[in-house]
Amino acid sequence: MATRNTEEYPVVWLQGATCTGCSVSVLNSVSPTIKNVLVDEVIPGKHVNLRFQATVMAGAGELVIEALEETWRGNKGGYILVMEGAIPTRADGAYGSIGEDKEGKPISIASRVETLGRDALAVIALGTCASFGGIPAARPNPSQCVSVRQLFQSKKVPTPLINLPGCPPHPDWFVGTVASLLLQGLPKSGELDELNRPKAFYGQLIHENCPRRAYYDEQKFAKKLSDPGCLYELGCKGPVTHADCPLRMWNNGVNWCVACGGLCIGCAAPGFPDLVSPFYEKTADITLPNIGQRVVH
Ligand code: FSX
Ligand code: SF4
Ligand code: SF4
């Protein structure tokens, strides 16, 4: 339990264009449990103080917007911003807002992410939508959704950014990243790849660690999903998707997409879903990159 000597790390968690699957996934964290993360000291002496999270907070309306703004005003340079979902930019951000200003005018998601992002210690883009645009930014992208990185580049926001793609992301990727921020501070040079992803979780391709890899090497391809064999001919995107799902597995280590007889649809890949569609067709123009070698970024 947090005590008076505990160091508090305020966290503001915003949601943009999202299905809220990222929140649900992180709530399923098992070790530590989400209760441990939010109520206890996740790292001895350090406590995550979640000040704003629309899915789980009890409050609503003006009160919670005040809490959000107080956190920002009172902790400049000291809070962590978690962004879930993409950011609609069309029509001055009219397609999504979080609270209102004093005159009752909606404050756009884009403007919130820019303001809160600029003054944060670090920003975690949680999920493929926040990291790369994801489903809300898929063609024809009617609300002109962008990723956090795209927004930061266009608005020249220099705050350190960590991308945790996955639709949804694995709870360990989030909890591990937060724990590392609390323990060691901002990521050191070389810990993130060129897409701002922690190499600890995204340093290898699904295909490099896949238990069906021997079938691939022997060119034994499944003809339908329930067959043994490599699922490449059926559309598996493991050869172009970086994540540690085969090693970590999902649902507290119970199973994962390929092992349960499905295939990897590339949910953590940049360009998901457009560039990895159709999910269940062999992607003809995949050039298999450096299979079997560690990816050097
Ligand atoms: Fe959903 Fe998150 Fe996908 Fe996106 O996940 S699980 S659409 S990554 O923003 O809530
Ligand atoms: Fe595994 Fe998919 Fe690679 Fe086949 S193509 S080895 S199923 S990751
Ligand atoms: Fe996403 Fe592929 Fe991992 Fe499944 S195996 S969770 S589709 S990255």
Image: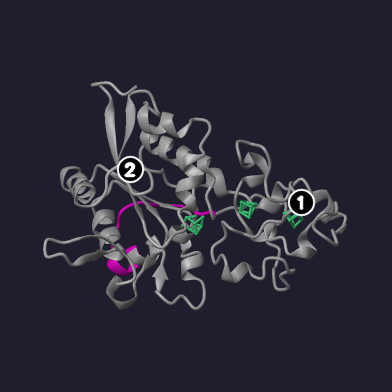
Residue 231 in which image quadrant: bottom right
Q: Which amino acid does label 2 sit on?
A: Met
For disc 2, the marked residue is 57
- Secondary structure at numbered mark 2: loop
For disc 1, the marked residue is 261
Could you say where residue 144 lies in the image, as x and y percent from the top left?
Answer: 40, 74
The reply to whether the residue tagged 1 has its Cβ within 8 angstroms of ligand 2 is no
Alpha-carbon neighbours of circle 1 within 10 Å: few (<14), some, or many (≥20)?
A: some
**Residue found 76% across the figure and 45% down from its top:** 211
Could you say where residue 123 lies in the image, as x and y percent from the top left?
Answer: 35, 50
Q: In this view, does 227 lie to the left or right of 294?
A: right
**Residue found 47% across the figure and 58% down from its top:** 19
Could you say where residue 213 lies in the image, as x and y percent from the top left?
Answer: 78, 50
**Residue found 30% across the figure and 59% down from its top:** 113
**Do residues under tags 2 and 1 come within 8 Å of each other at their CB atoms?**
no
Alpha-carbon neighbours of circle 2 within 10 Å: few (<14), some, or many (≥20)?
A: few
For the residues marked 2 and 1, what is the alpha-carbon distance in whole angstroms? 37 Å
Of badges 2 and 1, the one in the foreground is: 2
Q: Over which residues does the magenta segment extend?
A: 152-166
